[in-house]
Image: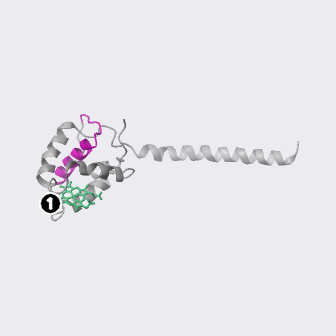
Amino acid sequence: MDRKLKISDSITASTWLFLIILMFSSAPLLSESGLSTNDKIFSKKQAKTGQKLYEQNCLICHDKKYFRPVFKSWEGQSLGTLFLVMSSSMPQGNPGSLPDKEYIDILAYMMSQNRYSTGEKELPTDVDKLNSITIKSRKK
Ligand code: HEC
């Protein structure tokens, strides 16, 4: 048969091979990204504790609806980054004044305001763990 066809066949084959290699090499990367905000990463009890802390420290400037668009605008980023920004800039006027655990509990409350599902576990203060959790839109 004619040569042109053969060449295009081999291009197709190598393209497929390339795609398959790409799939296998990127698969571990994808699974490494780990949990998302939909994976029941905080408890109801923790969100309750966070609510009290929020009322004491944040309510004067942010009503509870404030956090919904905030989570939207943070989609795709890690919870660790949000934690870092929040704990180093809030409450405005006295940033970083709360213990890490209290910022985390408030973060859990913020997630409950976005109606993410709760579970048995509490959201940890461990920054590496927080960095592996991706902020996603709530699963319905
Ligand atoms: C004295 C007022 C004040 C207090 C108290 C305060 N904030 Fe803020 N906060 C602000 C202002 C001003 C902004 C930035 C303006 C905006 O984007 O709405 C902001 C922004 C934020 C953001 C958005 C960050 C972003 O980049 O998306 C978060 C989250 C936040 N605050 C959390 C908190 C938490 C949690 C507390 C309590 C620990 C708190 N704030 C207390 C005034 C305050």
Q: Residue furthest right?
A: 1
The image's colour scheme reads one colour
Mark 1: few/some/many CA within 10 Å (<14, 14-19, 20+)? some
Q: Quadrant of residue 95?
A: bottom left
Quick one: quadrant of the C terminus?
Answer: top left
Q: Which residue is mark 1?
A: 97
Q: Residue furthest left?
A: 56
Residue 122, percent across and down?
Answer: 23, 40
Left or right of 75 on screen, residue 84: left
Residue depicted at 24% across the width and 43% down the height = 113
- 69 vs 82, nearest the viewer: 69
Q: Which residues are magenta?
A: 99-120
User: Which residue type carries mark 1?
Assistant: Ser
Residue depicted at 11% across the width and 52% down the height = 56
Beta carbon at label 1 within 8 Å of ligand 1: no
Answer with the quadrant where ligand 1 appears in the image.
bottom left
- 59 vs 100, nearest the viewer: 59
The secondary structure type at the circle numbered 1 is: loop
Residue 6 part of the magenta-drawn span: no
Residue 22, percent across and down?
Answer: 57, 47
Residue depicted at 88% across the width and 42% down the height = 1
Q: Residue furthest bottom?
A: 93
Tell me: residue 95, above or below residue 8: below
Left or right of 35 on screen, residue 44: left
Q: Quadrant of residue 114?
A: top left
Residue 78, percent across and down?
Answer: 35, 51
Left or right of 71 on screen, residue 3: right
